[in-house]
Image: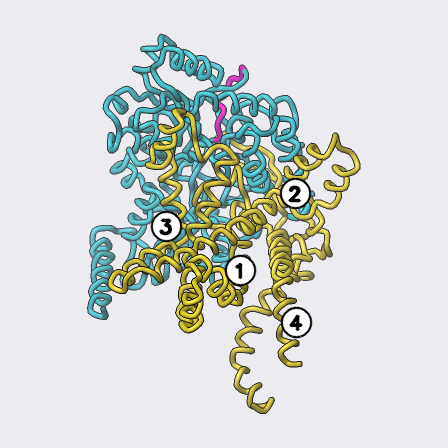
Amino acid sequence: MPHKTFFAFILPSLIAMVLFIALPIVSVVVQSFHVEHQRVLVEVENCQPFGGCTTEVRVDTAAMAKIRAEQPMGMFNGLGTYFNRGHLAVAEVGAILSNNAGFGDAVSRIYNLPFYKALSFTLVFCFVVTPLAMVLGFTIALAVNAVPRAIKGPVIFFSLLPMIITPLIGSLILYWMIQSNGIIGATLQNIFDDPTLSLRQSPALTWGSLLFYGVWTNAPFSFVVFYAGLQTVPGDTLESAMIDGASRWERIRYVIIPHLAPLATFVALVQLMDNFRVFEPIVGFSAESNATSLSWLIFNDLSGDSQLFGSAGATSVITIIGVVILLSPVLVRTWREFNHKVV
Amino acid sequence: MKLMLKTTVSLGVLCLTAGAAFADCGIEGAGSVRILSNDFEALRLINTTAGECATDGLTVTANATAEHKNLQVPALSINPAEYTVAVVANNSIVPLLNDDLIRPLDDLVAKYGQDLQPNQLIKIDGKVMAIAFMGNAQHLFYRKDILDAAGVAAPTSYEDMLAAAKAIKDAGLMDYPLAASVKPGWDLAAEFVNSYLGTGAEFFAPGSAELAIDNENGLKVLEIMRAMTEYMDPDYLTFDANGILAEYEAGNTAMMNEWGSLAGNALDGEGAAEGVVENTVLAAAPTIGGGSIPAVALWWDGFTIAKNVSDEDAAASFQAMVHGISPEMVAANPAVATWLVAGYEPGPAAVGVIATATGGARAYPMQPYMGLLHTALSSELAEYMAGTEDAAQALADVKAAYDTAAKEGGYL
């Protein structure tokens, strides 16, 4: 295809990508470099039904309107927001590293900073859920591939259910089941004979529930892709392997897995990216006290009585950088393979 | 589909015009009234009553949503504003004031506000900025039968509550006699604010945004908050206000601080276990640390009129809302809320809020940076309440988080 035709062909999607992906990201980056103007505060008399009149501080809106008209973006703060306590906390981490009572103390104090607390859970979620969900998805795909044709349809439908259910609803369902009067929670209390056992209270058990939910909800995606891949496994090779006396396990290990390896790379890529943005289960499980994620930090900055757009922007940019770092090994490999083929 | 749409629309118009036939709000001229409010029974009632003012030339629409706080600033910033009326409370009026999005109502009050009482007028810097119509507060709900069985008197302070809880637990009457809405997030922060107000101390250094809770009052409040958790269901960190009401109605808990606006639900007996409703007593919120005032924040709900709308729409909106909170509406619905409107006769569900207000409880602070403190409290106290952090560290974390946010918000 001539370059010109190719360009004309992709121009519409290129425009859409610039408008809906590139420009918003640029705007978030610019936003993250700014904070609110220094507020002009005045003391005024304030009367309300309870407590009568008192003198309270208010923002001088006329003065603020003037400042805003001059600099509508807010005050330029450079990378200040990135390095403050809510994000990378450079000063705090430095102080902890230079003055601590051993490794454990330093780790627990760094974990106490909101960004590192969120990052820890986000990374654990990524690296535990992604491989487990892929293994589970692959196992389901193998199993479904082996069931008789007559019941294949319903089995596939049920295997896909976790993906069909809205993530927030799915997490709420599991959350209600693990309550102390829910079916799983009550059973566990019964088995361990401990009426105070609560999956929602201890940090470790909350993490466990969230990871379990993550595997449950992510497995169907791997299953669908691997199941599609299984249909392309060459029958000849499998048959010759059988003639050579290969067991089922050996056929999987030496024929199917190598055949599906490129697909696995693709699934890992998508799943890592998805899991790095984990958010719904934290809200669904009301797990904020024990587990937070980068996306939850953004949500927290933008909800509530006062919104911090600069802070949310900085966390978003850090999230994007995190995704790029996570994907870089896979991207580099794909790039090398591509070059290799061209040569 | 199209037919259904048509039917729905014509039915809606029919309802509105039918309402107009009965009501006479006396609004002259054409215009548009668009109300944005939170979503609970009292506000829905006001919106419906204001809707009676619709005439051929005047449309009245209302959007009652729990997301109102996130909608109001962008919706009122545009010109003309998306909504002409924003229904607010102590905290949600602050963002509107900070961005200068609501108009002074003095002229409208003089012209159309004959039914309003002086204490309904929220005055800021001498100008009326909002009209309050109902009060609300968290206050004590307790089970008389359980307390009697344990042989303890009605609690009036947090210390009494802890002693009573111990007696109930020791007597084997209940495993978890206490409940509080301490779910990390808005609820947990509100619990701290409530108790801290009861100590009589201020949150900020006078006249500035400098935080001042890192003192013995703050430590005392945290100590009591954690002491209470010993008598709570182990899942306490996931309970919000609706969660503890359900626990209470199920008969699992004997004492809790719960919203006055939910007292009606608690007393209507729907979904309650046997013996809960008839033994429920509503009382003023408890005091803390030997203080004399109920340790709780008082709230008002009121309406404001957007700045970026025409004067005609503003006048029509004001009249429609005054009709919505009219003494007639209140006389017909005394049990729905603790009204601040003339001629209101408090019903049994309002006892707790009124006792709390007459006990001298303080209002939820309206400083422009209070929202930032609330957010800082909501995320930084969670670990302390879970028992994985000590009180001094929790207060230090709150201060650090607040300072970071206040610097970014331009207050420090």
Residue B29 sits in which quadrant?
bottom left
Chain identifier matching the cyan colour in the rendered picture = B
Residue B199 visible in the current orientation: yes
Question: At numbered mark 4, what does the secondary structure look like: helix, strand or loop?
Answer: helix
Residue furthest toward the top? B151
Q: Which chain's residue wears label 1?
A: A
Q: Which residue is mark 2?
A: A42
Residue B355, image x, y percentages: 40, 23
Residue at position x 62%, y 39% in the image: A57
Q: Nearer the viewer, mark 3 or mark 4?
A: 4
**CA gap, disc 3 and disc 1:** 43 Å
- Closest to the observer, A258 or B104: A258
Q: Is residue B400 left or right of residue B145?
A: right
Q: Which chain's residue wears label 4?
A: A
Instruction: Say which colour chain A has.
Output: yellow
Choose the circle earlier in sequence order: 4 or 2.
2
- Closest to the observer, A27 or A297: A297
Amino acid type at mark 4: Arg
Residue B102 visible in the current orientation: no
Residue at position x 23%, y 68% in the image: B1
Question: At numbered mark 1, what does the secondary structure look like: helix, strand or loop?
Answer: helix
Q: Which residue is mark 3?
A: B64
Query: Magenta region: which residues?
Result: B290-297
Kindly indicate whether the residue at mark 4 contacts the one at mark 3 (C-beta within 8 angstroms).
no
Q: Is residue B319 left or right of residue B7?
A: right
Q: Nearer the viewer, mark 1 or mark 2?
A: 1
Q: Is residue B409 left or right of residue B194?
A: right
**CA gap, disc 4 and disc 1:** 18 Å
